[in-house]
Image (spheres, helix red, strand yellow):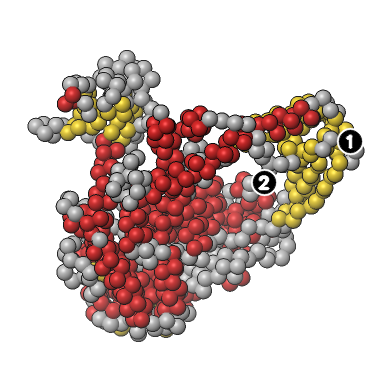
Amino acid sequence: MSPGYTLVICEKPDAASRIADALSGGTARREQVDGTTVFRLSWKGEDFAVCAAQGHVYGVSDPFDERAVYPVFDVEWYSSDLVDEDASGAARRISAVKKLSVGASRFINACDYDVEGETIGFNLLRYACGGKEDVALRAKFSTLTAEDLLRSFDDLKPSEGSGLARAGRARHAIDFVWGVNLSRALSQAPLGAGHRYRTVSVGRVQGPTLGFLVERECEIREFVPVPYWKVSGTFEKDGREFVAAYSRDRVDSWSRAAEIRADCEGKDAVASSIRRGLAQIGPPVPFNIGDLQKEAFRAFGYTPSRTLELAEKLYLGALISYPRTGSQRLPPSINYHGILRGIGKMAGYSASVEELTRSELKPVQGEKVDPAHPAIHPTGENPRRPLGVAEASIFDLVIRRFLAAFGPSARREMVDVSLMVGEHEFGLRGGRTVFPGWMKYYGRYSGYRDVGLPRISEGDRFRVEGVSAEEKFEQRPSKFSQSSLLEKMENEGVGTKATRADIISTLVSRGYVSGESMEVSDLGLAVMEAMTQYAPSIVSTELTRGIEEKLGAVEKGIGKEGDLLRETVRSIASQVAELSANEEVVGRQIDVALVNIVSKAFALGRCPVCKTGELRIVTSRSTRKRFVGCSNYHSGCRASAPLPQRGKIRATPKPCERCSWPVVYVVAGRRPWKLCVNPSCPGRKRA
Amino acid sequence: MKCRVCGRESTADLCRYHGEAEERLRAAYPHWVRAYGGMKWKDYLDSVKRNPQTGQWAKEIAELLKGDSE
C-alpha cells in the first residue's frame, strides 16, 4: 500500500463506484480489502482510494444491554453489528477503512450531504480513521452524474465543524435513550403484573404518530351516522338532459325532501343567473420528498417507504437528484438546458422539450427551501439498464413534474348556472380546459376533467323531467392512508423528511397498525392509552416537535447538542418513573391487548357444525402440527380439519359460499392462495 | 372495574371508548327522530346497528342498550 493517497469515504457501494468512475474516467482498479471493494485510481496526478460504508456502520447502545435494566442514560457508539443483528457487514467495512486510513495523507467525506450521510462519514473519520473528522474535506453533490461529481471534487470544502453530524449523533442518542427506556418500561410492565414478558416498544416519533392514528381510529369506531337526503333534478333543454344538484347539499328530513319534490314536479325551470369565469391554474411546484411520496401514492398507490426506496435507486443510478430533500426549488445552477437536452433524447419527451426550450426557461418555485439540496429533478441521463415498472413510473413522474415546472399557467373556463323552479334553486356546473399550459407536460398526472355545458342564456327555460331525493347517511371519517399520515406528520412537524416513511413502516411492523387498512390494533390502543395516562408528554406532539426544532438549531450551528441531551434525559426520566410506579395497571392493559391480538390471529370464524363455537387454529401438543378445531371441543363439538403445515395462514372475512366453513389465505411461496378449510367441501380448490 | 362490553380496565361500567360511543349514540337519536318524523328507540338502535357507517364501538353499545331495554 503506497503512502500519501487520498481516502474517499462514500455512503454506499454504488455511490463509491460512480465516484471512482467519474474521477478515473472508467479506469479505476478494484481490489478487495477485508472483503470490501475498494477503488484505486489517479486523478490530477494524485492517488485515490475510494471505499464505502453500507449505511450506518456505527450505532448507539448502552454498555450493559440488559433488557430488564432501566432507566439507562449512558450511551456509547459501537460497531453496528454489535447493536443490530441485521448489520453483519459493518465490522468488515470498519476494518477495511481502518487499514486504508493508515496509508492515507488526506481524507474526503463523500457521503450524501444530509444529516445521516454526514453522521456516517463523521463516525468513520472519528473512530476508524483515528480522529480525522476535523481535517477531512467535504465533497458536496446533489446528483451522481460525472459532471456534478467532478465539479464537487474540484471544489472540496473544508470541514465546517459539522453541525449536521452533531445533530445526527444527538438524534441517534436521543432516539436510543427514548426508545430503550420506554420500551423496557412497557415490556417489563406485564411481567410486573404477573404476566409473561412481551416486547413492546415506543419511539420518539412513533408515539405522536401513533397518537394521530389512535385519535382517528376512535372517531371512526365511535361514529354514529345521521340520515339526510340529497335532492337533485333532471332537466331537459333542446333534447339534452342535465342533472343539477339542489342548492342545499343536504336536506335534513324526509318530509322536507318530499315537499321539494312535490313543488317541482311538472314545472319548468328558468336559468336565473349565469356566472362564467376563467381560472388560471399555475404549475405544481417542484417535488420535495414529501410531495413526491404523496403524488406517487395518488398516481400509483405506492406507499411512502416504497417511493423513497425507488427514488433512492434512481438516485444511485444517477437518473435523478438526491431525493431526501425538503426543497421545492430548482436553482439555475442545476443547468436547466443541459437536463432538458438529456430528457429530449428519451422516448416520449422530445416534443415537450422542443416546445419548452423555444422560450425562456423559468421554472415555478415552491416556498420550501433546503440549503443542502435542490428539489428532486431528473439529471437528464438515460437509464443504462432496463428499469422495472415501478422504477420507470417514478422516473416518468419526476421527469413530467420537472417539465411541468417550466410550463405556463393553464386556463380553465368555469360556468355556474342557477336553475330556479319557483323558490327552489338547483345548480349546474361545467368546466373545461381552454389552454392546457403545464398540464400538457404533466400529462395524466394533472387530474383535471372537462364537464361540458351547452350555451345557456339567462331566462332560458328547462323542462323538469324529475326530481329525486336520495337517502344518505353522514360518512364516518376516513382512515389515514400512509400518504395522508405522512402529510399529517409533515404539517405537525413530527419526524424528518428522511425518517417519516420509516416510522410508518415501524408502526406496522410492531403490530400497532395494519399495513393495508391502517387500522389500529388493540395493542396500539393499549400502548397509547398507557402512555397518555402515565407519560403524556412523551407522546405529545409538542415535545417531539420541540426536539426537532432544537435539533434543527444544532444542524445550523446555533444550538448545543449537550444541552438538548440533558433536557431530553430529564423529560424521559420523570415519565419513565411514572410508568414504572404504575407498572401493574399498565401491565394488565397491555397483556389484555396482546391476548386479544393472539386470539384474533387464531380465530377463523363461526363453527358451521355446532353453530355456537368458533373455529380456531390449534397446535397439537403431541405432534406439534396445526389444524382447525372448535372452541366447543370440551362441550362435545368435534368439528376439525387439517391445515397446510407450511406458510402463514390468515383468516378471511367471508366463509365458503358452498359449505359455510371458513376460508383462509395461505401465504407460502410467491403467490398466496385461498383455501376452504373443510376437506369435504364440494368446491375445494386453490383460488 | 371492567367495561361491560370489552373487559378493559375502567372506572365506570363502560370504558372511556364505549362511554364516548354511548354519548354519541344518545346525541344522534333526536336527529333520526326529526329525519324520519318519529322513530322508536328500539328501531333506532336496530337501524344504527345495521348501518355500515356506524363505528364498531357504537354498534356494540347499540347492541348492549337493546339488550338492556328488552
For this orientation, the residue located farthest to the top is A682
Q: Earlier in the sequence, mark 1 or mark 2?
A: 2
**Left or right of A81, for residue A539:** right
Classify mark 1: helix, strand or loop.
Answer: loop
For this orientation, the residue located farthest to the front is B69
Residue A52 in the image, given as x and y percentages of width and height: 32, 67
Is A41 located above or below residue A410 in the figure? below
Residue at horizontal 82%, vertical 47%?
A275
Residue A400 in the image, given as x and y percentages of width and height: 60, 53
Amino acid type indicated by mark 1 = Asp
Query: CA gap, disc 1 to disc 2?
Result: 29 Å
Q: Nearer the viewer, residue A198 or A100?
A: A198
**Left or right of A229, for residue A137:** left
- Residue to which mark 1 is pinned: A460
Residue at horizontal 39%, vertical 33%?
B68
Residue at horizontal 17%, vertical 33%?
A619
Closer to viewer: mark 1 or mark 2 = 1
The chain holding disc 2 is A
Q: Is residue A216 visible?
A: yes
The chain holding disc 1 is A
Is A4 located above or below residue A327 in the figure? below
Residue A473 in the image, given as x and y percentages of width and height: 57, 36
Check disc 1: other Cα within 10 Å, few if <14, some if 14-19, many if 20+: few
Residue at horizontal 32%, vertical 50%?
B10
- Residue to which mark 2 is pinned: A448
Amino acid type indicated by mark 2 = Tyr
Query: On the rendered image, what quadrant is the N terminus of chain A found in?
Result: bottom left
Classify mark 2: helix, strand or loop.
Answer: loop
Callouts 1 and 2 in the same chain? yes
**Left or right of A191, for residue A274:** right
Q: Nearer the viewer, residue A497 or A87?
A: A497
